[in-house]
Image (spheres, rainbow, N blue to C red):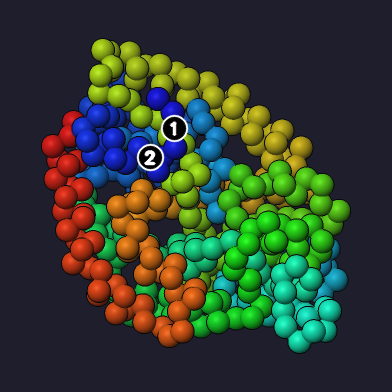
Amino acid sequence: MLSDLSGQGSIAREGLLKNYYNISTMNLSNPWWDKNIVPNFTILGNKLYFLAGDINFRDDYAVAVLYFNKLLIENFSYDNPYDLVDSGKWTLDAMLYMVNGFTQDIDGDGKLNINTDRYGFGDNGDIIKHLIFSMGGKITETDKDGIPRIAEMTEAHIGKVEKLYNEICNNDNVFVGDNNAIVHAMLDSRCLFYFEMLGAYSQFRTMEDDFGIIPPPKYDEAQGNYHAYVSNGWTSTYVVPITNPDFNRIGDILETMCAFSTDTIRATLYDVLFTVKYARDTQTARMIDYVVDSKVYDWSGDFGWLNNLTGCYTSLTNSKAFDFVSRIEKVSKTVNKTIEKMVEDFTAAD
């Protein structure tokens, strides 16, 4: 069964799905399966209920990217973002340098308006959550027993969140809000960077200026790899109902279909849609490889049961003070109880 990942968590907890590790004909290390979803959503060390790979494409559509206006980058003599990505120098500070230098009150009314003025960066919401993942952070982390836990509030983690609060949330050059208004600003050459999922690609097909796609920025150059958040609400995954009469047969079918999908579905997605139909340059495919290879899934994302935890990040956008640590402390007891109940449910399931 293929459906939205965000809706599959509850039925897995109810014991209605088969554990992929218990299907003997499945080999989760095969290259056609998403190499990131398996470790990220394996719980208790040996249980996995959601699977994606070359057989479906919405797991790729659901990965976070940055769209940018290539012409505006050239007009402002900024460094080529593609070169920065390739050299490992595409960082938050490198992005903010461009963002902060681009914004302008075009109509001169003394205030910035996304419908008339220029903005360096646009995000339709959840910007802290989006960028904390790209900077190497997580909202939950899996411990040695395979149990999701609240990410450790280290000095480094708190420092990253605080930097985002100070330099993104309290930055007039950054617009967070109406998605349609941001898209219109992009099409109208008034927005330099736009944070959205890869599946939004097609809405820029008619854009007059050339645009590019790059992964979200690293925290600094010392960070080894790029990371891109995957929206559990956007993505789809395959699940196997526990009522199926022949699990090994289902495993054979899934393995065969996914293997053949590498040269069909995935090839069409990359060779036709991403690199021919929508792309404006030859470098797009390489950038998308960076993004897809760097996927980060998280138990806190869009399932609903940990909304109070993710809210500690997302609500900072409108906060008048940086009270992130106290927010985490306030919800920790409730979150831990929620996780305990979740673990009980998964322990009882197949």
**Quarter of image, res 171:** bottom right
Along the line of sight, the residue nearer the viewer: 343 or 286: 343
At a point 17% along the width and 34% down the height, the residue shown is 349
At a point 64% along the width and 66% down the height, the residue shown is 122
Image-based side of 116 in relation to 52, left or right: right
Marks 1 and 2 close (CB-CB < 8 Å): yes
The residue under label 1 is 3
Most extreme residue toward the front, as rendered? 109
At a point 53% along the width and 77% down the height, the residue shown is 169
At a point 57% along the width and 73% down the height, the residue shown is 92
Residue 350 pos. (x, y %) = 18, 31
Residue 272 pos. (x, y %) = 72, 33
Residue 341 higher or lower than 118, as above or below:
above
Image-based side of 120 in relation to 38, left or right: right
Along the line of sight, the residue nearer the viewer: 232 or 30: 232
The answer to whether residue 15 of the structure is visible from this angle is yes
Along the line of sight, the residue nearer the viewer: 180 or 222: 180
Residue 54 pos. (x, y %) = 51, 31
Residue 255 higher or lower than 337, as above or below:
above
